[in-house]
Amino acid sequence: MKLKSTIILRKIAGETILIPVGEDAVRVNGLITVNEVGALICEQLKEERTVDALVAAVTAQFDVDAQTARTDIASFIHTLEENDLLA
């Protein structure tokens, strides 16, 4: 899975924001702010990634066990899917 090419990731004033462009800007109607873990996941999703690769990236960067990371990633991915942000 990976983020759509119409989703731009930017760090503004210390916050990481997902900015939809094109048709997605109209559909999403706003910006999406993510925390540090969400920002890492989105950075990873600029390229095609598996859930296992995301778990490895999150556990390498944050003090979290693999099962907790997997659960949190699944929830975050579900939110991205609900908003049709994945290609």
Image (spheres, helix red, strand yellow):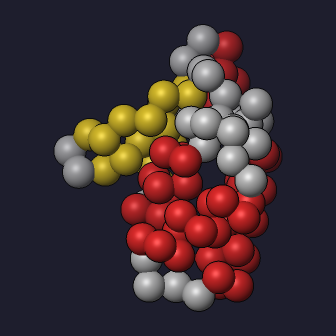
Task: Tell me if 8 is positioned left or right of 48 in this view.
Answer: left
User: Relative to 36, is 66 above or below?
Assistant: below
Is 83 or 74 nearer to us in this picture?
Answer: 74
> From the image, which quarter does the C terminus lie in?
top right
Residue 26: percent from left, percent from top: 63, 19
What residue do we see at 70% from left, 74% from top? 70
Residue projecting furthest to the top:
22
Is 85 or 59 nearer to us in this picture? Answer: 59
How many dots with numbers? 0
Q: Residue at x 62, y 76 (%)?
A: 69
Q: Is residue 77 left or right of residue 11?
A: right
**In the depicted structure, whether residue 47 falls above or below residue 59:** above
**Residue 76 in view of the camera:** no
Q: Quadrant of the N terminus?
A: top right
Residue in view at x 63 percent, y 60 percent? 54
- Looking at the image, which residue sits at the far left? 13
Q: Quadrant of the rendered structure where residue 47 is?
A: top right
The residue lying at 40 percent from left, 62 percent from top is: 36
Position above or below: 87 against 11: above
Q: Position of residue 68 (x, y in %)?
A: 65, 84
Image check: 25 left or right of 63?
right
Find residue 38 and report its horizontal and vertical position in percent.
51, 58
